[in-house]
Image: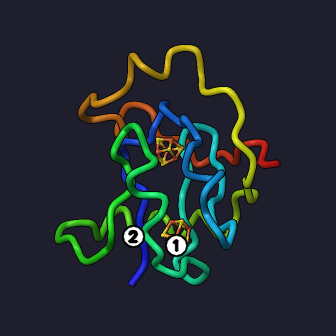
Amino acid sequence: MTYVVTDACIRCKYMDCVEVCPVDCFYEGENMLVINPNECIDCGVCEPECPAEAILPDTEGGLEQWMELNATYSASWPNITRKRDAPADADEHKGVDGKFDRYFSAEPGQGD
Ligand code: SF4
Ligand code: SF4
C-alpha cells in the first residue's frame, strides 16, 4: 500500500504535505507533487494536511492513473522536503475539475 497524489494537487501545490512526511518521499514537478510509492511507509500523516484533498490511499478504487503517474515521475523529479510559498493563484485552481488535461506538465520542479 502507498499514498497517492491526484490531479487535485495540480496548480495548488500548497506543500503542507512535504513538511510532515517522515521519510521525505515527495517529489516536485512544475505544477504538482507526487509520492514515491517505494519510499512511502503508509503512515497517512500527509492525507489530512493537504488543503486540496489531493492525497488518497491507494486502497481507494479508481486511482490507477494517478498511481502510475506518481511512480513514473517520482523517479525523475527532484525531492522536496521544505514548504515554499504556494503559487499566487493556487486558490483559484482548488477543487476545479479537468486540471490534468489542461495543466499537467511533465517538467520537473525546482526541488529543495
Ligand atoms: S498539500 Fe496537497 S495540494 Fe499541496 S502540494 Fe501537497 S499534495 Fe499537493
Ligand atoms: S503516507 Fe506518510 S510516508 Fe507516505 S507520503 Fe504521506 S507522510 Fe509520507
Q: Residue at x 45, y 48 (%)?
A: 49
Q: Quadrant of residue 97?
A: top left
Residue 67, disc: 2
The residue lying at 69 percent from left, 41 percent from top is 83
Q: Residue furthest left?
A: 61
| Left-right relation of 37 to 111 | left
Amino acid type, label 1: Ala
Question: Nearest the camera: 89 or 23?
Answer: 23
State yes or no: discs 2 and 1 in contact (Cβ < 8 Å).
Answer: yes
Spot occupied by residue 40 in the image (x, y as percentages of width and height):
55, 77
| Percent of width and height locating residue 9 | 44, 42
Instruction: Locate residue 1: give its quadrant.
Output: bottom left
Q: Is residue 90 above or below residue 32?
A: above
Q: Which residue is mark 1?
A: 71
Front residue (pair 108, 2): 2
Residue under the image location 37 percent in, 62 percent down: 66
Whole-percent x, y for residue 36 in the image: 58, 72
- The quadrant where residue 84 appears: top right
Q: How is the image coloured?
A: rainbow
Compared with 8, 103 (above or below) is above
* Callout 2 secondary element: helix
Q: Position of residue 48 (x, y in %)?
A: 38, 52
Residue at 47 percent across and 63 percent down: it is 45
Q: Give the residue type at disc 2.
A: Met
In this image, 32 relative to 108: left or right? left
Tell me: 46 left or right of 61.
right
Using the image as rendered, state which of residue 67 and residue 103 is in the foreground: 67
Q: Residues within 10 Å of mark 2 (few under 14, many from 20)?
A: many
Q: What is the spatial separation of the Cα atoms under label 2 and label 1, in whole angstroms?
A: 6 Å
